[in-house]
Image (cartoon, rainbow, N blue to C red):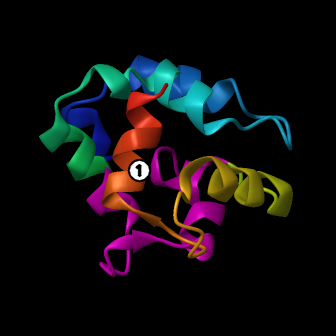
Amino acid sequence: MAFTGFLAASDISSAINACKAKDSFSPKTFFATLGLSKKTPSEIEKVFKMLDQDQSGFIEQDELQLFLQNFSKGARTLTAAEVKAFLVAGDMDGDGKIGWDEFSALVNDS
């Protein structure tokens, strides 16, 4: 995956394994396990752009549902409850999606 250029494969594996069970995903825990909060703003932005698959400038609900699969093809989809909790954690302006500033704040709060 493209993430392995700046994220350790072992960290990605650990982060995916930590949330294998349904309804066990926490964005802050996931980002901390990835070591993403220790990365440069430009590296965090690369992750954001990869997650924003439609290049809309936002990570929307459908992209959040497939969030884990961006890091590992065999990973599960997020449950509706996990997507909702992810939005609650990251969507500061209440528009139902996560923009770059919101994503950056969520990652750096990990």
Q: Specify the farthest residue to the front.
A: 93
Q: How many marks?
A: 1
| Label 1: element kind | helix
The answer, for residue 90, to whether it is visible in the render is: yes
| Res. 77 image quadrant | bottom right
Camera-nearest residue between 15 and 30? 30
Find out whether residue 51 is within the magenta segment: yes
Q: Report the residue at 18% width, 38% height from top.
A: 41
* Relative image position of residue 104 (x, y in whole percent): 34, 44
- Say above or below: 9 vs 99: above
- Say above or below: 80 vs 7: below
* Relative image position of residue 101 (x, y in whole percent): 33, 54
* Relative image position of residue 52 (x, y in whole percent): 37, 68
Type of amino acid at the residue the image marks with label 1 = Phe
Find out whether residue 22 is within the magenta segment: no
Residue tagged 1: 103
Q: Report the residue at 68% width, 35% height from top.
A: 26
Magenta segment boundaries in residue numbering: 48-75
Tag 1: Cα neighbours inside 10 Å, few (<14), some, or many (≥20)?
many
Q: Report the residue at 53% width, 70% height from top.
A: 97
Q: Report the residue at 55% width, 51% height from top.
A: 90
- Say above or below: 32 vs 107: above
Camera-nearest residue between 47 and 28? 28
- Say above or below: 58 vs 31: below
**Left or right, residue 43 beside residue 95:** left
**Left or right, residue 78 beside residue 59:** right
Camera-nearest residue between 95 and 86? 95
The answer, for residue 78, to whether it is visible in the render is: no
| Res. 6 image quadrant | top left
